[in-house]
Amino acid sequence: MASPTIASLSWGQMKVQGSTLTYKDCKVWPGGSRAWDWRETGTEHSPGVQPADVKEVAEKGVQTLVIGRGMSEALKVPPSTVEYLQKQGINVRVLQTEQAVKEYNALVAQGVRVGGVFHSTC
């Protein structure tokens, strides 16, 4: 099953192929997507993306996981999160969200089993 492309990105809004929803922040993986609700894990800009935030996507069998830190890169990604993914053999790309979406969509086009977590505001 292929990863869905990110169809559009603007401040506070993301659309994903195959979904009629507009997300503020989202998680995507081969075959699906959903809203990324920070309240589920108590996520805040600092310390940022925790292993619990990426666990769901990592468990979908992705080869690469792209993390979008926001338009102004306000969302932190601590080393523990990167290490958590790398220990599972997952390549990690941490980028500003517009760059992250470009990278993610390029990987989708190459047929990579890619997942992502994206923050679409600050």
Image (cartoon, grey):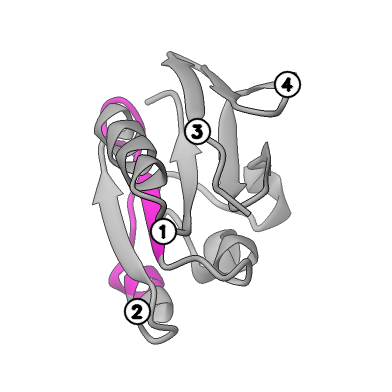
Gap in Å between the C-alphas at discs 2 and 3?
23 Å
- Is residue 75 something that shows in the picture? no
- Magenta span has 67? yes
Query: Nearest the camera: 53 or 28?
Result: 28
Q: Which residue is mark 2?
A: 86
The quadrant of the rendering that contains the N terminus is: bottom right
Q: Which residue is mark 4?
A: 21
Query: Nearest the camera: 76 or 69?
Result: 69
Residue located 37% across and 51% down the image: 66
Residue 17: x %, y % from top left = 60, 27
- Magenta span has 114? no
Marks 2/4 in contact by CB < 8 Å: the verdict is: no
The quadrant of the rendering that contains the C terminus is: top left
Give the structural element (helix, strand or loop) at label 4: loop
Give the structural element (helix, strand or loop) at label 2: helix
| Total residue callouts | 4
Span highlighted in magenta in the image: 64-82
Amino acid under disc 2: Gln
- Mark 1: give few (<14), some (14-19) or many (20+) Cα within 10 Å: many
Q: Which residue is mark 3?
A: 5
When asked about the image quadrant of residue 20, the answer is: top right
Amino acid under disc 3: Thr
Q: Depth-wise, is mark 2 or mark 3 nearer the camera?
A: 3
Q: Which residue is mark 1?
A: 65
Q: Does label 2 or label 4 sit earlier along the sequence? A: 4
Amino acid under disc 1: Leu
Q: Does label 2 or label 3 sit earlier along the sequence? A: 3
Gap in Å between the C-alphas at discs 3 and 4?
14 Å
Q: Does label 2 or label 1 sit earlier along the sequence? A: 1
Residue 118: x %, y % from top left = 46, 39
